[in-house]
Image: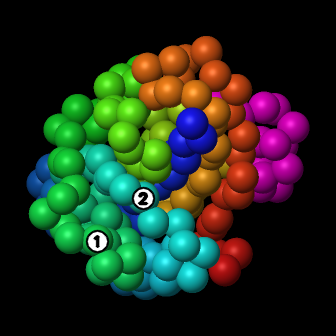
Amino acid sequence: MDKTIYLARHAKSAWDSGVSKDFDRPLNDRGMEDAIRMGKVLRHLSWKPEKIIASPALRAQLTCLAFCDCLGIDEHKVVWNDDFYAAYMVTLLQSLTGLSESINSVMLIGHNPAMEDLLIHFCDEQALQDYSQKNGKLFTTGNVAKISVSGEWKELLGLEATLEKLLRPKEL
């Protein structure tokens, strides 16, 4: 069975927000605009996941809620995974391999470096080179990648994946 994984990095955050904890850092104005614009593009492309698993950090929450609003997804159905905040790639992989086989599409919303590491893990080098920016950056804030795999979630580690598309807010 074909599966679709949407990897999303939170939109641009406000470094100057004055909050004492990084976890509580909100989106800045551009980040909020990008999250809404990206949500509208996801809706236009019919990139609507059956399940969303997201970091509970404020900037990831706000990005997720903007996507939910644009896609018509009930925010109460989002799984807020505390382990996504300071996750390593293996944590993200475990969240995927543990999914029910009745789910065919999932969106993970989190932070770098784990999100970019997972993208690199799944995708061949040529596909990634095609999407690398001139400055060498690949998975910047607000990006959403669509990855297709054929097989079951529990076999994900041994499956070939295809990067269908990588969207960046500044390229929309």
Q: Which residue is mark 1?
A: 73
Regarding residue 60, the answer to whether it shows in the image is yes
Question: Which residue sits at x=43%, y=20%?
Answer: 154
Give the percent coordinates (x, y) of residue 160. Answer: 70, 26
Asked if 171 appears above or below 59 in the picture, the reply is below
Disc 2 and disc 1: Cα gap in Å? 9 Å
Screen quadrant of the N terminus: top right
Quadrant in the picture for residue 73 = bottom left
Q: Which mark is residue 49?
A: 2
- Between 34 and 54, the residue placed more toward the observer is 54
- Between 8 and 164, the residue placed more toward the observer is 164
Residue 122 among those drawn in magenta: yes
Give the percent coordinates (x, y) of residue 158. Answer: 61, 15
Characterize the magenta stretch by its predominant secondary structure: helix
Asked if 132 appears above or below 151 in the picture, the reply is below
Question: Which residue sits at x=38%, y=44%?
Answer: 103
Dot 2 or dot 1, earlier in sequence: 2
Q: Secondary structure at mark 2?
A: loop
Magenta region: which residues? 119-136
Screen quadrant of the C terminus: bottom right
Give the percent coordinates (x, y) of residue 90. Answer: 41, 21
Regarding residue 27, the answer to whether it shows in the image is no
What's the coloring here? Answer: rainbow
- Between 50 and 165, the residue placed more toward the observer is 50
Looking at the rendered structure, the kind of residue marked 2 is Pro
Contact, mark 2 vs mark 1 (Cβ under 8 Å): yes
Question: Which residue sits at x=17%, y=38%?
Answer: 82
Give the percent coordinates (x, y) of residue 143. Answer: 55, 60
Q: How busy is the neighbourhood of tag 1: few (under 14 within 10 Å), some, or many (20 plus)?
A: some
Q: Which mark is residue 161?
A: none
Asked if 112 appears above or below 89 in the picture, the reply is below
